[in-house]
Amino acid sequence: MHRKSSPTVTPEMADQIRLLKAQGLYHHQIAALLEINQGRVSEVVTGKLHPPAGPRQNSLDI
């Protein structure tokens, strides 16, 4: 029996995951809506996968 693989999470999906999480949905609810694995949702929420874009810090700042 083969497991159904979770589709690749795109940057657009990651934005949607963060939005749904901010609206108060649980990881399992987001996963069900987007038909992906809960683990992928967790990776996006924690920033391990597709970290949110933010201001980059220059390492040369003194």
Image (cartoon, rainbow, N blue to C red):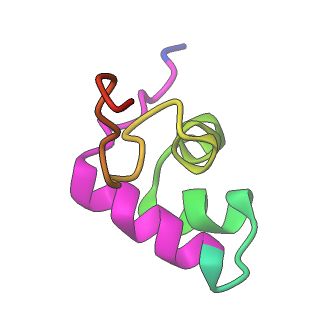
| 39 or 44: nearer the viewer | 44
Quarter holding the N terminus is: top right
The magenta stretch is: 3-21
- Horizontally, residue 12 falls left or right of residue 46, namely left
Residue 21 quadrant: bottom right
Q: At 42% from the left edge and 42% from the top edge, which residue is drawn?
A: 51
Q: Position of residue 29 (x, y in %)?
A: 67, 68
Q: Residue furthest bottom?
A: 23
Q: Position of residue 53 (x, y in %)?
A: 32, 53
Query: Is 20 located above or below residue 2 in the figure?
Result: below
Quarter holding the C terminus is: top left
| 14 or 7: nearer the viewer | 14
Q: At 57% from the left edge and 56% from the top edge, which residue is drawn?
A: 31
- Horizontally, residue 2 falls left or right of residue 52, namely right
Q: Position of residue 27 (x, y in %)?
A: 70, 58
Query: Is 15 located above or below residue 2 in the figure?
Result: below
Q: Residue furthest front?
A: 62
Q: Position of residue 40 (x, y in %)?
A: 53, 38
Residue 24 lies within the magenta run: no
Q: Residue furthest top?
A: 1
Q: At 48% from the left edge and 47% from the top edge, which residue is drawn?
A: 36
Query: Is 18 located above or below residue 36 in the figure?
Result: below
Residue 6 lies within the magenta run: yes
Q: At 70% from the left edge and 76% from the top edge, which residue is drawn?
A: 25
